[in-house]
Image: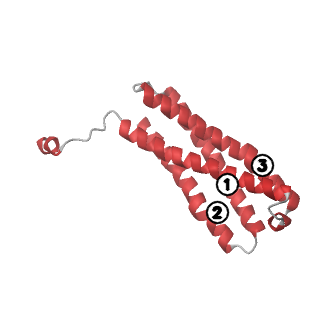
C-alpha cells in the first residue's frame, strides 16, 4: 500500500512539473501579447507548482521515515534524494521566485526592455536559469526515484519465459 501511495505522489509531482515546464510556460510566452502578462501567469502557476512540490516532498519524507527499513541502501537513497528535491523546491519558492518577483514588481514592463548588460536584467536572467535548473533537477530526480523504487521492490521479480510457463 505505501509503495503505491509513494508512486502516486511521485507521479503526480512529475506530472505537475512536466505540465508546467513543457506546456504552461511555453504557451504563456507564445500566446500572450506581452512578456509582463506571460511572466505574471507563469509566476503564479510556478508558485502552485512549488507549493505542491514542498507538500509532496514533506509527505514522501514522512512516509519514508515511518516505513520499516528493509533495504537500507534504497531507503537511504530515497530519503536523501527526497530531501534534496524538497530543498530544491524551497530554494525555488523562497529565494529565487521571491527575488524574480521583486525585480518584476520594481521594473515592470521595462525589465524586458533592459539590455543584458544592465545589472537588473542580468540578475533576472541568472535567477531564471537557476529556477529552470532547480525544476529540471527535481523533475529528473523524481523520475529516477520512481524507477529505483519500482526496480528495487522486493516482490518485483522478472521471471524467465520458462518460469512464466510453469505458473
Q: Quadrant of the C terminus?
A: top left
N-terminal label among 1 and 3:
1
Dot 3 corresponds to which residue?
98
User: How far apart are labels 1 and 2 at the CA level?
Assistant: 9 Å
Residue depicted at x 68% and y 49%: 130
Answer with left or right where residue 24 lies relative to residue 37.
left
x, y (%) of residue 39?
73, 63
Local crowd at mark 3 within 10 Å, few (<14), some, or many (≥20)?
some
Q: For the view shown, which residue lies furthest in the front direction?
A: 117
Q: Are marks 1 and 2 in contact (CB under 8 Å)?
A: yes
Q: CA distance from mark 1 to mark 3?
A: 11 Å
Q: Is residue 54 visible?
A: yes
Q: In what element is the residue under mark 3?
A: helix
Q: Earlier in the sequence, mark 1 or mark 2?
A: 2
Tell me which numbered mark, 2 or 3, is placed earlier along the sequence: 2
Q: Which residue is mark 2?
A: 25
Q: Secondary structure at mark 1?
A: helix
Q: Relative to 117, is 156 on the left or the right?
A: left
**Helix, strand or loop for disc 2:** helix
* Relative depth, front residue between 9 and 74: 74
Q: Residues within 10 Å of mark 2 (few under 14, many from 20)?
A: some
Quadrant of residue 163 within the rendered picture: top left
Query: How far across and how far down the image is residue 70, in percent?
Result: 40, 25
In percent of width and height, residue 140 lies at 52, 48
Q: Position of residue 45 (x, y in %)?
A: 67, 57
Image side of residue 151 versus residue 139, left or right: left
What is the quadrant of residue 118 in the picture?
bottom right
Name the residue that disc number 1 marks: 46
Amino acid at each position: 500500500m505505501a509503495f503505491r501511495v509513494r508512486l502516486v505522489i511521485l507521479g503526480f509531482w512529475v506530472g505537475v512539473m512536466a505540465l508546467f515546464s513543457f506546456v504552461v510556460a511555453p504557451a504563456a510566452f507564445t500566446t500572450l501579447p506581452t512578456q509582463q502578462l506571460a511572466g505574471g501567469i507563469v509566476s503564479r502557476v510556478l508558485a502552485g507548482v512549488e507549493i505542491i512540490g514542498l507538500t509532496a516532498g514533506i509527505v514522501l519524507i514522512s512516509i519514508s521515515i515511518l516505513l520499516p527499513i528493509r533495504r537500507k541502501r534504497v531507503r537511504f537513497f530515497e530519503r536523501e534524494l527526497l530531501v534534496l528535491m524538497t530543498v530544491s523546491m524551497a530554494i525555488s519558492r523562497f529565494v529565487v521566485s521571491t527575488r524574480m518577483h521583486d525585480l518584476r514588481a520594481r521594473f515592470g514592463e521595462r525589465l524586458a526592455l533592459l539590455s543584458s548588460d544592465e545589472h537588473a536584467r542580468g540578475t533576472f536572467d541568472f535567477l531564471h536559469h537557476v529556477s529552470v535548473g532547480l525544476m529540471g533537477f527535481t523533475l529528473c530526480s523524481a523520475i529516477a526515484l520512481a524507477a529505483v523504487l519500482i526496480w528495487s521492490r522486493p516482490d518485483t521479480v522478472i521471471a524467465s519465459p520458462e518460469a512464466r510457463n510453469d505458473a
